[in-house]
């Protein structure tokens, strides 16, 4: 057996660890309750949070080297002085689950196993210690309190139940806030629960964004008196456009999303009142969008995160790489890449970017009712490979969703959509947009989709607009409509977390890949 060279912290790192350790102890005590957590993160300067996050990430790296057999072997095979990235292909697939755990075993007290959906291939199992789950639950609970306040509510947890990471853990997290009923994605049961307890209570309904929309559509069709109820929405599992938020806000008092990944954990980041205010301003003002996110036509999800729990950085491909910095993690993830494209900045950096276009972040905080916590910002566009390209123009799922929700009538009948590239007999290609609709597909409905989506896409996406002017005959998309559960959407039958078909010109209609990031 080859002997591995022992990697040791530098003197500078050891000094940083010595300074950071007592600070960690103080923070742990201070964050024991929500009021003290809030007070601490209002006081801590963004520059200190950035330093502490980097220091904790480096400490987690050395800890994994010492304690985790697979990680030590992985780093040794990579060579070089830099901390290597990990992902499913490079680290999860080659090494057994127990080898990726502390001390090479997952037989620790009160370990829980979560399973990913497996829609991209083989389902994966992820092991988590009791302590790391409790810490994650606490942060989700704090996030909910921050967004929705401290008045009591009844939580209806409509995330899928079972081995999946989100459902059970979301229910356990929100039990810290009060009453929880774990219905799963059962619309009849949810509406029955609302009727049973009546409109005198406030309800927080948790679920995937398309499910919350579907709940409203079914309830309205049945004549449910939504106007008598105070509903709050907590979404997750995939991205949500501001058009969809507007749609949901017709029945929900407020709607916020959380960001996580089964590979990592739930509750990595969450929308806050100020992050939503900034995102909506970026939707309405191109100068704000460009100042924050550059020339990309997509409007990313914008979150804030706790840098003491998670360290986020951006690699050379524009992908966000995470390190879970807590020592409680049973199977450490060091510089783990789920291949979500996005970026990060401190609260001060966000304020400076907004100031360049005359926007005062403090005014946004006050107007949105934000709690004034200076946590860093994280924005996520989605997975890198969920894009089609025609004549040099990239078209993103986020573009289509944004266009779709500008037409409420079409949004109401659309369950899902997907993108691909259609190739003709002579090798010519054009975009193909496929929609799953609740009405009978016919030529008139197809024409309505084309007349609604295409002009909006031209106005929204600068690359598509330029290509449209140069090659209009090539950019006219094929519009295909399917009844619910038919065609490429048949794979969604019985699933609440939908699968999207996104592929290049070689794709077949049964080639599906998951388009869910949040």
Image: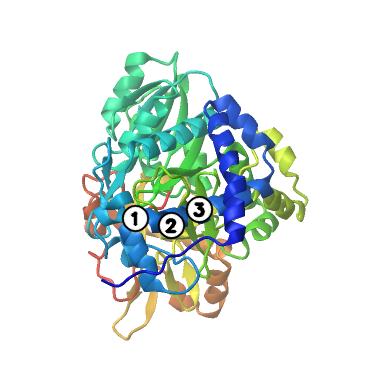
Residue beneath label 2, please?
A: 334
Secondary-structure class at tag 3: helix
Sequence order check, earlier mark of 1 and 2: 1
Image coordinates of residue 363 in percent, x first then y, are: 74, 38
- Asked where in the image residue 122 lies, by quadrant, the reply is bottom left
Residue beneath label 3, please?
A: 59
> How many C-alpha atoms fall within 10 Å of the one at disc 2: few (<14), some, or many (≥20)?
many
- Asked where in the image residue 203 lies, by quadrant, the reply is top left
Image coordinates of residue 84 in percent, x first then y, are: 44, 67
Question: Which quadrant is home to the N terminus?
Answer: bottom left
Image coordinates of residue 341 in percent, x first then y, are: 49, 61
Secondary-structure class at tag 2: loop
Residue beneath label 1, please?
A: 68
> How many C-alpha atoms fall within 10 Å of the one at disc 3: few (<14), some, or many (≥20)?
many
Secondary-structure class at tag 1: loop
- Does residue 292 sit above or below 409 in this rendering? below
Q: At x 54% / y 43%, what residue is drawn?
A: 306
Front residue of 508 and 83? 83
* Residue 452 shows in this picture: no
Sequence order check, earlier mark of 2 and 3: 3
Q: What's the distance in space between the residues labelled 2 and 3, CA to CA?
A: 10 Å
């Amino acid at each position: 057996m080859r002997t591995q060279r022992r990697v040791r912290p530098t003197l500078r790192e050891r000094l940083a660890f010595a300074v950071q350790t007592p600070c960690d102890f103080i923070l742990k005590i201070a964050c024991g309750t929500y009021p003290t957590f809030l007070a601490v993160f209002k006081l801590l300067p963004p520059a200190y949070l950035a330093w502490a996050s980097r220091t904790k990430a480096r400490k987690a790296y050395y800890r994994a080297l010492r304690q985790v057999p697979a990680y030590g072997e992985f780093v040794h095979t990579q060579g070089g002085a830099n901390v290597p990235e990990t992902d499913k292909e490079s680290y999860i697939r080659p090494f057994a689950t127990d080898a990726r755990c502390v001390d090479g075993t997952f037989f620790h007290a009160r370990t829980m196993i979560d399973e990913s959906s497996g829609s991209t291939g083989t389902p994966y199992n992820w092991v988590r210690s009791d302590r790391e789950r409790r810490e994650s639950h606490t942060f989700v609970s704090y996030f909910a309190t921050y967004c929705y306040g401290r008045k009591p509510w009844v939580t209806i947890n409509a995330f899928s139940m079972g081995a999946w990471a989100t459902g059970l853990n979301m229910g356990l997290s929100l039990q810290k806030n009060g009453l929880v009923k774990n219905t799963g994605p059962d619309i009849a049961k949810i509406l029955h629960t609302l009727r049973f307890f009546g409109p005198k209570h406030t309800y927080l309904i948790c679920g995937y964004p398309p499910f919350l929309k579907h709940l409203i559509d079914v309830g309205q069709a049945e004549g449910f008196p939504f106007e008598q109820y105070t509903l709050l929405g907590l979404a997750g599992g995939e991205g949500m456009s501001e058009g969809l938020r507007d749609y949901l806000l017709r029945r929900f008092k407020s709607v916020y999303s959380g960001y996580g990944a089964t590979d990592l954990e739930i509750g990595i980041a969450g929308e806050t009142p100020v992050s939503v205010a900034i995102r909506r301003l970026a939707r309405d003002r191109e100068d704000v969008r460009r100042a924050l996110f550059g020339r990309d036509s997509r409007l990313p999800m914008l979150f804030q995160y706790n840098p003491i729990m998670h360290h986020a950085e951006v690699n050379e491909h524009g992908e966000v790489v995470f390190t879970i910095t807590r020592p409680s993690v049973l199977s450490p993830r060091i510089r783990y890449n789920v291949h979500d494209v996005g970026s990060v900045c401190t609260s001060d950096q966000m304020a400076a970017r907004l100031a360049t276009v005359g926007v005062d972040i403090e005014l946004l905080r006050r107007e949105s009712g934000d709690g004034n916590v200076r946590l860093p910002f994280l924005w996520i566009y989605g997975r890198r490979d969920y894009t089609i390209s025609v004549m040099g123009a990239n078209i993103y799922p986020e573009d289509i969703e944004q266009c779709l929700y500008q037409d409420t009538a079409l949004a109401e009948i659309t369950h899902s959509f997907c993108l691909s590239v259609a190739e003709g007999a002579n090798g010519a290609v054009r975009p193909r947009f496929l929609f799953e609709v609740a009405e009978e597909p016919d030529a008139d409905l197809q024409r309505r989709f084309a007349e609604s989506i295409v002009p909006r896409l031209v106005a929204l996406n600068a690359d598509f607009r330029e290509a449209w002017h140069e090659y209009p005959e090539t950019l006219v998309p094929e519009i295909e409509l399917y009844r619910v559960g038919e065609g490429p959407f048949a794979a969604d039958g019985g699933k609440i977390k939908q699968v999207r078909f996104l592929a290049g010109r070689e794709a077949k209609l049964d080639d599906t890949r998951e388009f869910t990031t949040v």
